Image (spheres, coloured by chain):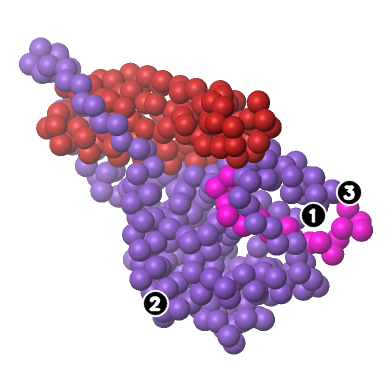
């Protein structure tokens, strides 16, 4: 069974596509557990008659002490090295669904694309919708559809990056699957992790979903144009976030009106 | 449900180590999971059976050692036990702390035949 999609076969695995590409090519299917599922059959048969084995083999304890996420971390390190060598500033954008990740991207790209080369990787369970929104701005973009998977992993980003063929001195925006829980555990090799929360969400979200705020470097508070209409105390929200992660840096913006975006742009430019 | 990814990570480690040791299957696996590791043990148990099916871990006994969390205040150096990742220093109320333990997520040992 596949960990990213939860499926039993490789037909539902993550799909990595450029806008305009079609889904049915099997080469594009991406499934890192293939080898294992094939080799199990063999193992299985050997053990059907347990008796002889019980006597002829001794139990042996292997001290392993291995980190379970090591595989993801190794490939994340590989991505990171690639980004650093090419001077690519890679951002992993995480949030709950609907906080405005794609809108922030759209506005940022539209305003800065003439001064900075951008690349985008979009992560969603289904559809090319987000990639099409970015593609409309003439920015190179790859869509990763995780199927039933709830987060991006470093090997998917690795494959997507290969397809992007990025030039040096650029910014790569990776929009993770909208989910405030699972993506926190999976390093993609990003330079900085950016968590986005909008003013329509509760101010105690940082302590409800602390892992994401703990592992992020930047916190964008979006939809500040709605502040007159919603019941949220931004200072309280920030205090909760700082309680989880005292090193967080904040940007208060509205992707709709453009308010506060200049500070964000300044920070982006200072990192390349 | 990232616990499924975690379970499959465990399966991969067990498969690799079993092959390296030229063993046939795993009879027992010992895991160390910190309370701040971000893994729901119930969820892990829930996905375990389907994750280990037809692998060396099928029918293996699973032992999970829960590791309690401990932090150390950066401001006043008090060591304190933690329940949540956002717990503050009980002595000086500072948010700045190092997590000494409780983030573990590893395969400690496997017993193979």
Q: Which label was assigned to residue A199?
A: 1
The answer to whether one can see residue B15 in this image is yes
Q: Which chain is purple?
A: A
Left or right of A79: which side holds B16? Answer: left
Res A221 → quadrant? bottom right
- Tell me, yes or no, whether dots 3 and 2 are on the same chain: yes
Specify the subunit that label 1 lies on.
A
Q: Which residue is mark 3?
A: A231
How far across and down, in percent of the image, does residue B68 sit?
A: 50, 22
Q: Nearer the viewer, mark 1 or mark 2?
A: 1
Q: Residue furthest bottom?
A: A114
How far across and down, in percent of the image, does residue A164 sit?
A: 42, 74
Q: Which residue is mark 2?
A: A165
Which residue range is magenta in the image? A212-232
Q: Quadrant of the N terminus of chain A?
A: top left
Left or right of A140: which side holds A35? Answer: left
* Residue shown at the point (62%, 45%) measured from the top left: A245
């Amino acid at each position: 069974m596949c960990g990213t999609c939860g499926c039993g076969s490789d037909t539902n695995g993550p799909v990595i596509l450029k806008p305009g590409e079609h889904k049915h090519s099997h080469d594009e299917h991406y499934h890192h557990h293939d080898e294992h599922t094939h080799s199990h059959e063999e193992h299985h048969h050997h053990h059907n008659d347990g008796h002889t084995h019980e006597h002829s083999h001794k139990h042996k304890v292997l001290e392993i002490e291995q980190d379970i996420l090591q595989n993801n971390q190794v490939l994340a390190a590989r991505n990171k090295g690639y980004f650093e060598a090419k001077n690519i500033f890679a951002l992993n954008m995480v949030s709950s669904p609907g906080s405005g990740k794609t809108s922030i991207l759209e506005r940022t790209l539209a305003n800065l694309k003439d001064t900075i080369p951008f690349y985008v990787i979009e992560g969603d369970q289904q559809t090319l919708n987000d990639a099409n929104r970015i593609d409309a701005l003439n920015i190179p973009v790859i869509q990763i559809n995780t199927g039933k998977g709830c987060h991006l992993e470093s090997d998917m980003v690795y494959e997507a990056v290969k397809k992007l063929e990025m030039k040096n001195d650029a910014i790569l925006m990776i929009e993770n699957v909208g989910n405030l829980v699972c993506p926190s555990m999976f390093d993609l090799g990003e330079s900085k992790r950016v968590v986005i929360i909008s003013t329509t969400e509760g101010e105690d979200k940082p302590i409800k979903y602390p892992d994401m705020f703990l592992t992020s470097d930047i916190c964008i508070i979006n939809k500040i144009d709605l502040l007159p209409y919603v019941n949220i105390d931004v200072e309280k929200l920030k205090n909760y976030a700082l309680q989880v992660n005292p090193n967080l840096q904040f940007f208060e913006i509205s992707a709709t009106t453009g308010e506060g975006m200049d500070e964000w742009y300044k920070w982006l430019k200072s990192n390349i | 449900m990232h616990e499924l990814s975690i379970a499959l990570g465990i399966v991969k480690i067990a498969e690799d180590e079993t092959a390296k040791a030229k063993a046939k299957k795993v009879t027992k696996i010992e895991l160390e999971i910190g309370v701040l590791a971000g893994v729901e043990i119930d969820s892990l148990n829930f996905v375990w059976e389907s994750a280990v099916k037809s692998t060396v871990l099928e029918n293996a006994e699973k032992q999970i050692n829960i590791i309690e969390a401990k932090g150390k205040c950066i401001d006043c150096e008090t060591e304190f036990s933690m329940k949540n990742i956002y717990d503050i220093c009980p002595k000086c109320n500072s948010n700045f702390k190092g997590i000494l333990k409780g983030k573990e997520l590893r395969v400690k040992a496997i017993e193979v035949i």
